[in-house]
Amino acid sequence: MDREVVFAVLVATLCGGALVAAGWWWPAGLTSDENGTASERETWWRIWLPFGPAAFVFALLCGWLLVEPASAEPVPKVLMLAALLFGFVFVRAAWRASRSLALSHTNVTLATVGFFRLRIICAPQFADSLDQDALAAAMEHERAHARHRDPLRIWLAQFGTELLWPAPAALTRLHAWKRALEISRDDEARAHGASGPDLAAAIVVALRFNQKSAPASCAYLAEEAFVRERVARLLQPLEARASSQREFGALLVALLAALPLTVVLGIKFGEMLIGSLLTRA
C-alpha cells in the first residue's frame, strides 16, 4: 500500500485518538484570576493545550514518513474503521465551521465582524436606544475586539472545540474563554476612556434586544450571573490587578522546540513502532 495512504490513515487514527483522549481527560482548569487580560490569555491557551499530544504524534509520523519506502505495510481493517470514525469528526467540525461563516448579521445589535477586513455593525434601533456616552462606550468595546481580531480567534476556537467533540470539557473551556474575553474587552475599553457605568447601560440594553434573536450558542453569555458579574465590575473603579497567570507562552515555546526532536525520533524508531502497530492491529 502507498505510504501516503498509510500515513493519512495513521494520522486520522492516532492523532484522532490522541485528540479524543485529551478532550475527555484534560481537565477544564477554570481560572478564578481577577485580572481580565490574564484570565483571557490563560483560558485561550487552555483551549489549545489538549492538541499537544496529537501534535507530537503527528511529528512522529512525519519522521516515519521521511524514511519509509514507497510501499508500506497494508493497513488492517480495524485501523481503517477507526480512521473513518475520526474522519467523520473532522468533516463534522469543518461543516459546522463553514456553516458559521454563513450566519446572517440581520438581527445583530452591535458586533465586530470579519476576519481580515473587520468592521463594526450597529443596528439603528439599538443606537437610538442609547445616549451618546453609552453608545460611545459600547463602540470602544467593539474596537477592542477589532484590535485583537477576535472574530477570527472566536472562529478558530470554535473549530478547535468541534475537533474535540463530543468531550464536554472542551465546550466548558470554550465558554470560559468567551466569558473571559468579554470581561477583558470591557477592561480594555475602559482603559481607552470608556465609562464603566455607560458600558454597563449599553450591555443591559443590548441584552434586551438580543433576548429573542441571539443564537443558542451564545445564550450562556446572557446568563443572569454573568451579566451581574460584568455590570458589577463595570460599576467599580478600574484597577491594575496582579496576575496569577501561568506562563503559557514559555510552555508553548518549549512544546514547539520539542517537535523537531520528535521528528528525529520518528526517523529513528518510527519503522519499529509503526510496523509493530500495523502487524498487531
Image (spheres, rainbow, N blue to C red):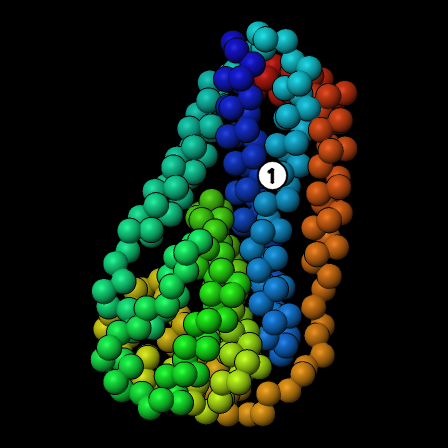
Q: Is residue 268 above or below residue 94?
A: above
Q: Regarding mark 1 in the picture, which secondary structure is present there?
A: helix
Placement of 138 over or under 103, stated as above or below: below
Asked if 197 appears above or below 64 in the picture, the reply is: below
Where residue 228 sits, quadrant-wise, is: bottom left
Quadrant in the rendering for residue 188? bottom right
Residue 102's spot in the image, x, y percent? 28, 51
Residue drawn at (43%, 38%), measured in percent from left and top? Answer: 90
Residue 202, picture quadrant: bottom left
Disc 1 marks a residue whose amino acid type is Ala
User: 140 or 90: which is nearer to us?
Assistant: 140
Viewer-side residue, 105 vs 273:
105
Give the residue number, with chain letter if any, for mark 1. 54
* Side (left or right) of 55 relative to 2: right
Q: Would you place residue 43 above or below residue 68 in this image?
A: below
Q: Position of residue 163 (x, y in %)?
A: 47, 44
Locate residue 235 relative to residue 257 in the image: left or right.
Answer: left
> Is residue 113 at all visible to an observer of this figure?
yes
Q: Where's residue 75, x and y in %? A: 52, 15
Give me the residue at 28% from left, 69% from top.
108
Task: Tell me where residue 24 appears, x and y as whole percent.
Answer: 54, 49
User: Is the residue marked by circle 1 packed among few (<14), some (14-19), or many (20+) residues within 10 Å?
Assistant: many
